[in-house]
């Protein structure tokens, strides 16, 4: 069955170019009404004009879709509220939020300025928080919502020179994991996408042949699967060059070392077994991870 988003209202942040533009075009093609947000700044977040979002709106309209432009900065709570109000006034609902806006200020941690560190966290992590908070009440009231956070392999696995970016992107995984639990009773499904695409963010770290294979449009099918009616929740998909994988934060079986003076030495001596990935699991919640540890305390769970 083709994924049909007719009647659904979607907001895509940072959709004036790159991945956001590809996401907005695909959402429009599948029938969603799309609010195309973009501040229109440079790669590092400086400057800004509204024309990027307007150009994408024109593209969606030319293809027969419905779209409106918005120039809010995701870091400004009032502007974000006005953006959500704009969608509500135009179409009366917000069903899908794609948190995609982002900037880059790569530097090694030694050379990293703390102002830049905070700015990157502010745009990626707090920007997604601001937009999610502004639609959460609408989605709980209508008992339906789909939210996607844009994480990154830099957060999941680390990348040289991207300490702030990686911290923000892994922060989004924690946000998504908790919101997918809190959203369950309202049928709000929350997921993460870690894309790989040729955009202005990656133009200087890959060669020409690699960039040619990394069309942003080849990432957007994974986005669509994460925000459609049948979307999963709590999932991290990685997508690029037409491939899709899932990333998990796993837990090894580990060992019970107990307490006592020599417990640190027993941790060190048991490290090979602690990091051994045989029988690895993914706890459904943080609490379940603690309960797993408690289940290994001799006599405790039986007594409870
Ligand atoms: P991009 O620079 O083309 O897109 C980012 C967009 O966000 C820009 O159009 C920019 O104007 C907009 N933006 C920046 N700050 C904003 C703000 N405060 N408010 C509103 N809009 C703002 O780069 P892209 O590669 O398409 O990046 C899209 C997302 O994907 C980002 O979150 C990025 O971190 C993530 N990502 C990209 C890759 C990749 O391979 N390209 C890999 C991992 C993650």
Image: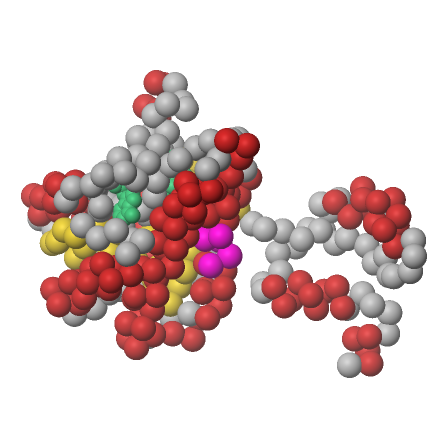
Closer to the camera, 283 or 257? 257
Residue 205 belongs to the span the image colors magenta = no
Quarter of the image with the N terminus in it: bottom left
Q: In the rendered view, tell whether residue 145 sits above or below residue 32.
A: below
Q: Is residue 119 left or right of residue 58?
A: right
The furthest residue to the top: 208
Which residue occupies 39% across, 55% down? 126
Please tell me in which quadrant of the rendered image residue 55 appears. Answer: top left
Q: Is residue 31 visible?
A: no
Kindly identify the residue that appears in the image at 49 percent across and 52 percent down: 171
Q: Position of residue 151 (x, y in %)?
A: 43, 46
Q: Residue furthest bottom?
A: 304
Above or below — where is 92 with respect to 51? below
Question: Which residue is rendered at x = 56% and y = 49% of the image?
Answer: 248
Q: Which residues are magenta?
A: 171-175
Q: Quadrant of ligand 1?
A: top left
Q: Nearer the viewer, residue 25 or 78?
A: 78
Q: Residue 185: x percent and y percent?
A: 43, 75
Residue 141 locus on image (x, y percent): 30, 77
- Horizontal side of 163 relative to 36 (left or right) equals right
Q: Which residue does the image show at 22% across and 46% down from the upper left? A: 38
Q: In this orientation, does residue 300 appear?
A: yes
Task: List the single residue furthest toward the right.
Answer: 261
Q: Specify the quadrant that holds the C terminus.
A: bottom right
Q: Nearer the viewer, residue 79 or 194?
A: 79
Query: Which of the 4 image quadrants contains residue 196?
Result: top left
Work out whether residue 137 or residue 192 is closer to the camera in this orientation and state it.
137
Q: How far across and down, in percent of the image, does residue 125 sit?
A: 41, 52
């Amino acid at each position: 069955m083709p994924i049909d988003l007719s009647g659904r209202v979607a907001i895509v942040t940072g959709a004036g170019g790159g991945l956001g533009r590809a996401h907005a075009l695909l959402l429009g093609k599948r029938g969603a009404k799309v609010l195309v947000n973009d501040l229109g700044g440079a790669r590092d977040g400086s400057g800004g004009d509204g024309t990027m979002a307007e150009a994408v709106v024109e593209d969606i309209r030319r293809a027969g879709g419905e779209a409106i432009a918005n120039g809010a900065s995701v870091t400004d709570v009032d502007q974000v509220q006005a953006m959500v109000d704009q969608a509500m006034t135009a179409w009366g609902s917000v069903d899908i939020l794609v948190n995609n806006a982002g900037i880059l200020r790569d530097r090694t941690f030694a050379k990293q300025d703390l102002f830049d560190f905070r700015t990157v966290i502010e745009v990626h992590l707090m920007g997604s928080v601001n937009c999610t908070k502004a639609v959460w009440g609408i989605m709980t009231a209508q008992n339906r919502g789909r939210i996607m956070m844009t994480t990154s392999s830099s957060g999941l696995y680390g990348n040289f020179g991207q300490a702030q970016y990686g911290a923000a992107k892994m922060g989004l995984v924690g946000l998504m994991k908790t919101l997918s639990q809190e959203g369950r009773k309202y049928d709000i499904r929350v997921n993460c996408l870690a894309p790989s695409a040729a955009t202005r963010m990656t133009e200087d770290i890959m060669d020409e042949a690699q960039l040619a294979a990394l069309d942003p449009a080849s990432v957007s099918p994974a986005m669509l699967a994460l925000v459609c009616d049948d979307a999963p929740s709590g999932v991290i998909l990685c997508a690029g060059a037409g491939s899709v994988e899932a990333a998990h934060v796993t837990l090894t079986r580990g060992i019970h070392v107990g307490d006592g003076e020599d417990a640190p030495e027993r941790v060190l001596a048991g490290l090979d077994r602690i990091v051994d990935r045989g029988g690895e699991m993914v706890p459904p919640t943080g609490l379940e991870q603690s309960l797993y540890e408690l289940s290994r305390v001799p006599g405790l769970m039986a007594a409870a």
